[in-house]
Image (cartoon, coloured by chain):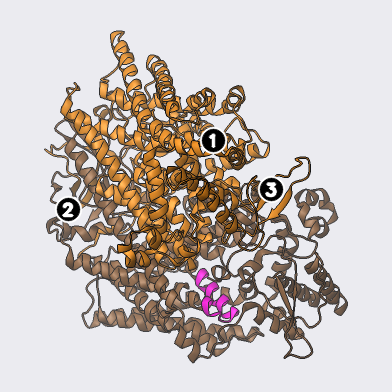
Chain colours: A brown, B orange
Amino acid sequence: MGTAPRHFLGVKPHKALLLLPFLLTFVLVGSRGESQAMDNVATERMAEESHRQDSANLLIFIMLLTLTILTIWLFKHRRFRFLHETGLAMIYGLLVGVILRFGVHVPQSTNDLVLSCAVNASPATLLVNVSGRFYEYTLKGEVSRSKGHQVQDDEMLRKVTFDPEVFFNILLPPIIFHAGYSLKRRHFFRNIGSILAYAFIGTVISCFIIGLIMYGVVSFMKMVGQLGGDFFFTDCLFFGAIVSATDPVTVLAIFAELKVDVDLYALLFGESVLNDAVAIVLSSSIVAYQPAGDNSHSFEAMAMLKSFGIFLGVFSGSFALGVATGVMTAFVTKFTKLRDFPLLETALFFLMSWSTFLLAEACGFTGVVAVLFCGITQAHYTFNNLSPDSQDRTKQLFEVLNFLAENFIFSYMGLTLFSFQSHVFNPLFIIGAFVAVFVGRAANIYPLSFLLNLGRKNKIGSNFQHVMMFAGLRGAMTFALSIRDTATYARQMMFSTTLLIVFFTVWICGGGTMPMLSFMSIPVGVDSDQEHSTTSMLDGSVRRNTKHESAWPFRIWYTFDRNYLKPLLTHSGPPLTATMPACCGPLARCLTSPQAYENEGPLYDDDADFILNDANVSSMYADVTISTDASGSHTINRKLSSNANTGCGPSDESLDHELALAEHEVAIRGTRLVLPMDDPIDPPITVTLPPPPSPPHSDPRRHRL
Amino acid sequence: MGTAPRHFLGVKPHKALLLLPFLLTFVLVGSRGESQAMDNVATERMAEESHRQDSANLLIFIMLLTLTILTIWLFKHRRFRFLHETGLAMIYGLLVGVILRFGVHVPQSTNDLVLSCAVNASPATLLVNVSGRFYEYTLKGEVSRSKGHQVQDDEMLRKVTFDPEVFFNILLPPIIFHAGYSLKRRHFFRNIGSILAYAFIGTVISCFIIGLIMYGVVSFMKMVGQLGGDFFFTDCLFFGAIVSATDPVTVLAIFAELKVDVDLYALLFGESVLNDAVAIVLSSSIVAYQPAGDNSHSFEAMAMLKSFGIFLGVFSGSFALGVATGVMTAFVTKFTKLRDFPLLETALFFLMSWSTFLLAEACGFTGVVAVLFCGITQAHYTFNNLSPDSQDRTKQLFEVLNFLAENFIFSYMGLTLFSFQSHVFNPLFIIGAFVAVFVGRAANIYPLSFLLNLGRKNKIGSNFQHVMMFAGLRGAMTFALSIRDTATYARQMMFSTTLLIVFFTVWICGGGTMPMLSFMSIPVGVDSDQEHSTTSMLDGSVRRNTKHESAWPFRIWYTFDRNYLKPLLTHSGPPLTATMPACCGPLARCLTSPQAYENEGPLYDDDADFILNDANVSSMYADVTISTDASGSHTINRKLSSNANTGCGPSDESLDHELALAEHEVAIRGTRLVLPMDDPIDPPITVTLPPPPSPPHSDPRRHRL
């Protein structure tokens, strides 16, 4: 036998799992694993058997997803909008859960063995000497005392149970990255102040309100003797944190399909993307508070401060890492001619984005949060450097990953309602939780909207507020956070309640979106560009709008981004040689790409891609002369520029002009302009502009979501 | 605490791994896993620490791949062709291996504990009672006796070691599926007889020749006392099986770039794709032979027969499963209007293809083989039903997965030369192995080519044979098969030797492809279509060619496929109502898609996509009248049809005509036809045909590889 190489045997699962953003893992308790190199044929056969069993179990999920896809198609085909695919996935998951729970009975395998010899520690690895042979065992975790004696678990249900870390390390990253990568950027940045307010302040408010209400409920339960275990205030806060993360999936799919107001869309989407990040960091800070309290669970200023420090540190660290790798990718794609080889480019993009996650985890930050900001950075800078082919590829790749991961999570959610074997459904707690979630959401939206409206010119109407209130669905992130830890009574009760909250909000609120929209008389069928151009007709108001909407920090950021960051990281103009001080001349020349000199105008920016339908943009400009020669759009642009420059000074006002211009040009990048004539009944003359240099062809629906 | 839900804790890794076709996993021996729900804070911290460590380790690989991508780009940019990306990945892997081996030293963690209490079995799960608390341990495998006492392994090297099952269950499936999905199908089917001969008979010959030579070598080594352990005849055969799988990657990349003769390309690619499947089933059959011999390792007719039965059973089972899911996908995509939603379609395609793998594994067949045939079926039928968008998406998705997996395997190969700690390098064995591999390849190619040439009109020239001989690189499959089991002395020696063979063939043979091609005066720069159309000018010879090249079973298959399977599974004509007997009328009507009636002609087939450059096809037809109206290609087709039908009877000859016609039409599907004029010096008249209904737009380079 020689010196045997046992390192190849045995794999730690959960660590494994975290590693590639897309893999599903089974928990198998009563069976063993490594098939190779065992002399024992019986062992090998057992391993093979369990490998088969695993494949079969995973097949259940794949079939479930396939079924979901086919049904979704049927729904879309027949234009049923009341049930979103994720809601459907949950229903199928529920059905399979019922079948597994009540239909299938697998006898409990009896090869668990209780070793009674007393050891004074529980090391990670155990070498057991069985009649001269050494077997290696790895620790899986502590088992509750009751389990050691009466094993009543259903083997089958255990088998379809995943390690909760799978959600964090494999399923969530592509979802979150996709969300960041597909942010509607222009509208996002226009509303960035409000979005940040809702996402940060709002989520914290909601978390504490829910925590307080739940503490009241729990205290009451303790009084009436309904509480079967410990439930501390930090648990209440933790619950508040996890149910404060809203999920945009269902609502936004409907919004995109119905073409609801873009600002409402941007507010909801931006909030739900960012508050995931806030909730995840918040919950881990609250958990970090606990041990400092030394199980006394009383308030401690120092521990509180420490938690707050952790929150800030983890958040800013993850943010910085995400942005850093995004920027690095932008640099690489800008300064190499990798775009000649789309496959290499796509692979690089994928690897760099993935390494963000790993890097953050390796540094002790939160991978999911880092991935979110990496996605936003990639979309804002790197995306513009990619070849059109890679732009499509990367979008589609992450779209598919997102779709699969999302539906997997939701169908698993349905399944787990029956397969999870330690549910604690407490009516009082559940009712309290529903009320708390409702109140918490209200305390987030209404007061903040009121405050924001003081500053906003483009007010957030009360109907918008009601819709935002109503659209606070809970989804994947809430589920992943609550299933991560189900060891204590408190956590089990939270998990069960969270499941119900997710079901309720996805089915009821998600399904009720359409009636809600019409009840609130939210304009439907608004083309983002029409909407934009109509407002741009009211020239002055738009300028003031933009000015007031973007508070000064954002305007400074916008200018800085446009003059320095974009030229530095992408091929867009103006060249750095023009914007940087003269002393940095050589550096600026070196960093400016040749293309930047060509597009002197602010941007041939792909931000538009997420907003425009490339096919039929109909914008109306009363004061624009259009030339139809090859450089059509360029001419218009210059004309507008000169207009702007003569109209007003080079001050703030002109910056606003620039902003508006950027948006104008974006609108012009489509292929058709409709000129309004004197007689509005006449058919409008259609002027066909030459198509933009490299329009990433893709259907608009994809960008909408 | 209540009834604790421990099922969520702990995950069996290897099983996990097999599950999603793309995930990388770490082996961590001395650390533990589950972080949640442990009261012990120290344990949690350890878990966190090891999670971080894992992330950092995986980051090494990601960085390695990133570096490889950038260097490849540089090479492609400067047109260096002597080193392929996989060769480069190996070099980088080697460098990192050297650094880890000699540069980094991580102290051995000392938390392994040897339990000395005697147990009379080694169960899968162990419950250890540590002062009243139960901890669950899972079996990882047997440890060699030596290890129990003297632990000299380097922790760091272990950490970058993957479970070998990762290769089979996660990295190989996308590679193999991609190979099947991108087979150059027309040329593949034209040479199917020869390809099958090389892949099946050739691989078996090679396996046995190598096995016999190695048995001689091993016997000699035993005589001179160079052998440090057992090495049976079945081990020799096993070695023969694993090194008989050739890898096309390097050579074919160069072939595609240089546009080497398409038949040579088809022969090499087809052979290397199929012989992977043969080698994998062959090696498992040989392993299955072993236990039947009851460790006596003498020849036994019954065991031999059983092994043969296993070979046939596993191969045909995997084949049937792969084809079955492929056909099912074709049905689903044909009869639902899923093509309106490319995202759903792509997701479905991905899930169905993946479920092939799982289904095969669940049934005890070989997933990788099933996936190969699934890929071929998907390409042949399903691909034609997909929307153009999905065609792109699926191709690109699997292209990216293939690229990442392949380069990962090769860089890991380089790393493992230094990180694997039980190498057995025996000079005699290595020299013997190189000779055996060489002789085995020769015994495959030359005799078979001689026999095939007896039947082929389009002979396989001796220069082609030499190139095929030379191009027998070993790669991912050989590596994966040899690393799967490294428990015994024999297997370790095989593994070490295999590594060297892969390095040698990839670097030397791969790098020498260009000189070899010019030395053998293989025509380079042959456009597959030019080549085709020049031969088609010599009208008679082509017809005879096609007839003789396709032996009767293949011709029957071709007709059956064209008349029944294609119309049944895709939208292409002729309608089943025309080809099926009258009695099946209603069924036929029900199964025929409306489009089939429109394309009465044999095919608007996408087989062409893998061969033609959509952009500039210049075919020359002396006897074709071309009309430039909207139904241009249709007219030509009919004209040719009538020609054919008047020229000869409705017998075999007409079938050949049909075959040739199919190929003509394929050639016509491009966008430009160049008509040869009386005076060849005159510039040719260019007739622009309308583009085909839905040409999957994509650049030709992609299809080439």
Check chain identity for marks 3 and 1: say if they share one.
yes
A522 over A109 or under it: above or below: below
Q: Position of residue B39 (x, y in %)?
A: 29, 57
Q: Position of residue A417 (x, y in %)?
A: 28, 70
Residue A379 visible within the image: yes
Residue found at the very far right of the displayed protein: A646
Q: What kind of secondary structure does the magenta stretch mostly adopt?
A: helix
* Tags 1 and 2 touching, CB below 8 Å: no
Q: Chain of mark 1?
A: B
Left/right placement of residue A15 relative to residue A184 reads left
Classed neighbour count for the residue bearing mark 2: other residues with Cα under 10 Å, few (<14), some (14–19), many (≥20): few
Q: Which residues are magenta?
A: A256-274
Q: Which kind of residue does numbered mark 1 sit on?
A: Ser
Q: Position of residue A215 (x, y in %)?
A: 34, 78
Quick check: is A262 in the magenta stretch?
yes
Instruction: Identify residue for label 1.
Output: B541
**Label 1 vs label 2: CA separation?**
87 Å
The first of marks 3 and 1 along the sequence is 1
Left/right placement of residue A465 relative to residue B197 reads right
Residue A177 visible within the image: no
The residue at 52%/86% (across/down) is A465
For residue B132, the mark is 2
* Tags 3 and 1 touching, CB below 8 Å: no
Left/right placement of residue A565 relative to residue A704 reads right
Quick check: is B423 in the magenta stretch?
no
Instruction: Identify residue for label 3.
Output: B674
Classed neighbour count for the residue bearing mark 3: other residues with Cα under 10 Å, few (<14), some (14–19), many (≥20): some
